Structure formats: C-alpha cells, structure tokens
Image (spheres, coloured by chain):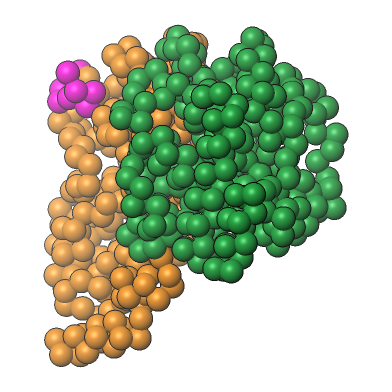
Chain colours: A orange, B green
Amino acid sequence: MKHSDITTQSCLPYKKGTIVPVRDGYGKALLRLGRVDERVVVLDADLAKSTRSDWFAEEFPERFVDVGIAEQNMVGVASGLSLIGKVPFVTTYSVFVVGRAFDQVRNTVCYSNLNVKIVGSHSGLSVGPDGGSHQGIEDIALMNALPNMTIFCPCDANEAFLMTLTAAEMDTPVYIRLAREATKVVTEEDYHFEPGKANIFREGTDGTVISHSVICSEVVKALNDLDNRGIKLSHIHLGTIKPLDDAITEMISGSDRPVIIVEEHVEAGGLTSILAAACSLSKPKKLYSINLGDRFGESGSPHDLYEKYGFSAKKIAERITQILEL
Amino acid sequence: MDDILLAEQAKSVRKELLAIINRAGSGHPGGCLSAVEIGTALFFRILNHNPQNPKQVGRDHFILSKGHCAPLLYVLLQKSGYFPKAWLKSLRKLDSPLQGHPHSLKCPGVEVSTGSLGQGLSISCGLALGKKMDKTASYVYTLMGDGELDEGQVWEAAMFAAHYQLSNIIAFVDRNSLQIDGNTESVMSLEPLSAKWKAFGWDVHTIDGHHFTEITDSVSKAKKSVEPSVIICRTIKGKGVSFMENEAEWHGKAPNEEELQQALKELDQ
C-alpha cells in the first residue's frame, strides 16, 4: 500500500474543528511510516520534544539520530544516509535548518538531488514569545530558490500528516513547513492532498483569498465573518508552493476581482513575490525577464555559458527583438 | 598492485592530471599533486569497488571532501575504468560530465557532489551510520584538505563520528600545510592537529602521505580501531613538480604549455 493511500476519515488522525499543532500531524505520520517502511530514519538537532520527532524516537530508537545542536552536520549526515538508501527526515526549527544549513541543503542535497526531507517545525510568527530570532519567516524564499526542491506548506495537522506520507514516497528533496502553535483543523473527512495542486476551501464572487500554512484557520474565520456581512470571497489554500500550480496564476490573471494573498512570511521571496512574478510573466504579459529559471549552473567558459543560458549580447538582443515583435 | 606498480601509476596520474588542467585552462594542481599517493593507493589497492557497476551494493565509498581536487578524482576514476579516456579532454568545458567540481548526477563513480568545503565528513558519517544500521561490513574513505579543517562543520562531524562510534570511517587529511592565502599556521593555525582529533575521540595516525607502505599500514591499523580513524598525511603541495612544490600560488592556477612540458619532463626523470 502506498503511504499516502488514505481516503477515509478514519485514517486522517484529527477531527475537523479540533485544535492541534501541525507538528503533531508530522509526528503521527512518522510513526506510521516507521511501522511500514524500514528505510525511514529521523534526525533531530536537540529539539526532538518540540518537533514531535521524539514520538518516533521512542518507538524506533535504532532509527532515530540526535545530532546535538549541529544543523549543518545533520543535513550532511542525512545526505549520507540517503546515499545508502535510507529515507531521512531532518527536523528542527525552520529558521535553523533553512538558514544555518542553507549551503548544505543547496550544495549537497539539492545539487546532488538527494532523497532528504527537510522539516522546519517552527515557522511564522506563531512561534510566539521566543521572538524574532526563532521565527522562520524567510524560509520559503530560500527553499524556493533551489532547483530540485519541493515545498509543502500544510494548513493543519491532517494535511501535515498527508504531506509527510507523500514526501516519503518521493525520491527527491522536500521541504515541509510546520508551525508550533495549536491551530484549528480545517480539513474535511474527504480531504485530498495532491502535490502541486491547490485546494479550494470556499467559493465566492467578490474576490479571492490565497493562503498557505497554518494561517489558514484565521483566514477561514475571517471569511466566515465577512460572509455574515454579505461579502462572499473564494478561499484557495496553496499547500504546494514549489512547483507552483499553474492554474492559480491563470486564475489570478483572468480574474476581474481582487486577489489577496495572506502569508506568515516576508514579502521578498514568499508566495507574494512568487505569484506576482508568475502572473506578471504569464499571459497577458506585463513583464519579461531573461534569467536562469529554476536550474543550477555548470562548468564552461563564461562566454560559452552566456551563450547557452542566453546572456551574451547576441542572445539578449535576439530575445529582446522577439519580445518587441510579439 | 605492489609498491613499484603503484609508483608507476602515481607518476602517470600526475602527468595526466596536469595535462587535463592545462587543457582546461583552469583548476587546482597543487592539492591534486599532494594527494596523488593517497588516491592511487586507495583506488588501486585499498578500495573495494566495481567500476563496471559503480553503485554496487556493499562497496566501499570514497568521498572527495576537497572537491576542488576533482582532476585527481577524474584521473583515478578513468584509470579504474569508470568512463572512457576521451572524457578527460572535456574537463571544465560546456556540457562535460567532468565539472570543475565533482557532480554526482553527471559523472559515474562520483558518490556525491562536493566543492563547498567542510561537508564531506558529515556525508561520510551518514554513509557509515547507514552501513552500521544495515550491518554492512564496508568502509567509508574520506579525503579532506587541511585548510578545509577551518570549517566548523568538520568538527561537528568529528564529534558525531566518535559519539556514534563510526569505526567504519577512515578519513585522510592531506596535510600539505598550504591554503590559498598562505601557510595554514599563519592563516588559521591547526596545530596541535593530532591532539585535536584525539581529543575529539578519534584514532589518529600521522604518516608520510607520499609513502605507499605507510598509507597501507595505517589503513590496516585503522580497520582494527573501534573508533573512527583519521590518517594525517604529511605531504608536499605540488609534489613532483619543482616549481609547484610548496608554492601556495599553484593552489588554483593551471600550468601553461611551457610549464606543462617542464613538469612532464621532471616527472619522467
């Protein structure tokens, strides 16, 4: 059976309306994975109790690795484990794994396209009293910049559960964005998560709100309140930020009503930037760009590389001519 | 391969790597030349590997943590039979499988991409831990530069390997005492290096890194240790080419045609 082959409410761990931290959904999924897949290994950097990886540690001590407070080494060790056929889940606060270990995630995990799952447990403001040093609010910008990376942002504990199972089935790098605070479970019993596809939570005619991650439950409440006042808005939850669901950019481009993004993330590089760029660069085009797209560079003379990647004066001029003739 | 054949092979490796760096027009000859005997001993005597099946289950792993010494790795891989000799000519050129720093998705035999220093020992820890989990009796050999030991991650990995008793790691430090900005002891002092590794819980050997018997004997001793082992190899950066030896400027500079011919002549003497 596939890890994510779960279609009935009895398999989703939490009832709609209950208040549960998304990291609990992650912890439950790890337990499930541990029982069916011996390749699954979990690593933590001295925060197992906070991230819920301690649940896995208790049941599968021989497959749990505490690296101490050493995030860079943790990503490297996970990379080595993946090279020998394990499916490692690296878990710690998002601000630490994404920031402290960015070079390791870039140059070892993504550049080699390794099967390493990176789980940032405390993203957004809802980390709370620990303050700005501990709030991961630029993680999407950093992870989205990396070729070969997939980014999942669960709206609640049930979706965190499903996304963790889904990530285990993939053999590529995945970043899963979790949060600390207990939030309301918003998913219905028939909820289905498909990687790369947005979920429509509500339909209305006055405009559309797009959100990702646990701020979802606040958005749900806000739209309920507005609905009571006669303002009917659609609500789209974008659980996968990378790869981006093309249907969303098409919807925004074709919409004559306002589209409002709500995200616990800085403007630069978050979903706001991502959708602004995608919509401006899609039809009808408002903006054109000659850039590297979503890929790493390679060896070659600067001249050869500029030719191949479209940055030589000749290639730039050719492209501009094409654009002007459109 | 006996010591005489290994010495012949090492000479051939030196000539080939200088020729391909010359052809590429850029690269890092100094640290390649200092590690030639270590690499040659590993690939032609010590490693249990199968060039016909690079991903063979149960093989030993070799991780080149000092990824800028890719030309050395490529020559060793080619001479072992991982890919055709013609590939060597494409080093650092557009669309080549032989990237400036090793890329595991492009070149067979490269276990993992390296180039950003300080990461190889952590990766080796993961491989070694996985082998222990699977009860696989094979080894992970890691080659690090000495300048690379400035990176904090190396010491995170050193703590980790000792804590988890990863006795199946055998790490080499190419102790040529030079990094880009000069002597390691003036840029960022490493000594007492042996005592540092010992204090981190490692089995430590210090040898002449250009001596095949010493390399082989130290590996045999390392295999008997219950702790992870590090072999600190005293070497000469640029070894074998008079004008490159102990000159930091040859860390990352390709020989021109004249310099190449001079180097090849010296190596043949």
Look at the image and give the residue range highlighted in magenta. Answer: A1-10
Q: How many marks?
A: 0
Q: Closest to the observer: B22 or B26?
A: B22
Would residue A89 be seen by someone viewing this image from the given angle? yes
Question: Is B164 on the left-hand or right-hand side of B242?
Answer: left
Residue B68 place in picture, x, y as percent? 56, 51
What residue lies at 46% left-to-right and 63% top-to-bottom? B23
Q: Closest to the observer: A295 or B33?
A: B33
What residue lies at 69% left-to-right and 31% top-to-bottom? B211
Per the image, is A127 magenta?
no
- Magenta segment, prevailing SS (helix, strand or loop): loop
Above or below B243: residue A322: below
Above or below B251: residue A63: above
What residue lies at 39% left-to-right and 63% top-to-bottom? B93
Above or below A11: residue B86: below
Question: Is A173 on the left-hand or right-hand side of B218?
Answer: left
Quadrant in which the N terminus of chain A appears:
top left
Residue A180 place in picture, x, y as percent? 49, 35
Residue B196 place in picture, x, y as percent? 80, 29
What residue lies at 16% left-to-right and 77% top-to-bottom? A284
Q: Closest to the observer: A242 or A162?
A: A242
Above or below B98: residue B50: above
Q: Closest to the observer: B193 or A148?
A: B193
Residue A70 place in picture, x, y as percent? 62, 34
Would residue A25 be seen by someone viewing this image from the given angle? no
Per the image, is A2 magenta?
yes
